[in-house]
Image: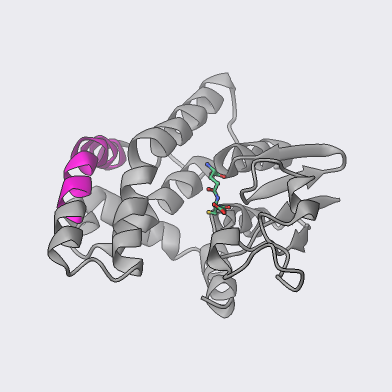
Amino acid sequence: MLTIYGVYRSRASRNFWLLAELGMEFEHVPVIQGYRLPDPEAEDAPFNTLSPGFLSVSPAGAVPVLKDGDFVLSESLAMNLYLARKAGGPLAPSDARENALMEQWALYGATSVESHALAIMYAHAEGRAKTPEGEAEIAAETARLRRPLGVLNSHLREHGHMVGGRFTVADINMAEILRYAQSEPGLIPAYPAIAAWLATCHARPAFKEMWERRLAEPA
Ligand SMILES: N[C@@H](CCC(=O)N[C@@H](CS)C(=O)NCC(=O)O)C(=O)O
């Protein structure tokens, strides 16, 4: 049996979205981020990333984590590539080249986009976006995103999807990374091919199912 550790309000969202697309059965163990709790080590604290029971599964102390029998895997993007390959079908790579391209885009998203997009999201979530410091931070992160977003916009304008000219796990991985940048109004709309592709990704029933479950979780 497949088990996913994490909450919908975490990077586990990208795994839950894929699992809904695949219609794959799994057990969900809710694990909240320790930093969201006043005292994650308190005896009555909910199961969290610092709980000994979770650290024994994943010493990195971060969600999401996947368990497939005795196989344990962390890193949300790697988890999605594993799940897609395990399931096979149109969301998975069809050959070694597609596989390599899906890995390429996952690594590009993780190394060139995610940290800047997250910084923008946190500036909004933590109420700094309208302060002079927050505005400067958002402007600096937006500038750092200019080249990668330009690359993605040209790629999507030409190909329509990340890999293989069809919706795949590579689209889920990149769409979930780019979602963080949507906190800044006007940023994504400046890249019309990304904006149009993201809208079609977010119109998918499996995304909506994941999103409803996320909204149902305490903020
Ligand atoms: N690169 C990792 C990042 C994992 C990560 O930082 N997870 C956050 C939640 S989205 C977390 O568990 N943080 C716990 C903490 O810092 O206490 C991945 O994509 O899975």
Residue 199: image location, x then y, percent: 35, 61
Number of numbered discs on residues: 0
- Residue at image x 71%, y 38%? 73
The scheme the figure's colours follow is: one colour
- Residue at image x 75%, y 61%? 29
Q: State the extent of the magenta-drawn residues as a range.
A: 138-158
In this rendering, the answer to whether 29 lies above or below 58 is: below
**Visible residue check, residue 163:** no
Q: Quadrant of residue 85?
A: top right
In this rendering, the answer to whether 114 lies above or below 22 is: above
Residue 218: image location, x then y, percent: 56, 78
**In the displayed structure image, the side of residue 158 where residue 1 appears, left or right:** right
- Residue at image x 55%, y 41%? 77
Nearer the observer, 26 or 180: 180
**In the displayed structure image, the side of residue 160 where residue 47 appears, left or right:** right
- Residue at image x 61%, y 48%? 62
In this rendering, the answer to whether 172 lies above or below 34 is: above
Q: Quadrant of residue 160?
A: top left
Nearer the observer, 172 or 78: 78
**In the displayed structure image, the side of residue 21 where residue 144 appears, left or right:** left
- Magenta-colored segment: predominant secondary structure: helix
The stretch drawn in magenta includes residue 139: yes
Q: Quadrant of residue 44?
A: bottom right
**Visible residue check, residue 155:** yes
Residue 151: image location, x then y, percent: 25, 34
Nearer the observer, 107 or 192: 107
Residue 206: image location, x then y, percent: 57, 63
The stretch drawn in magenta includes residue 163: no
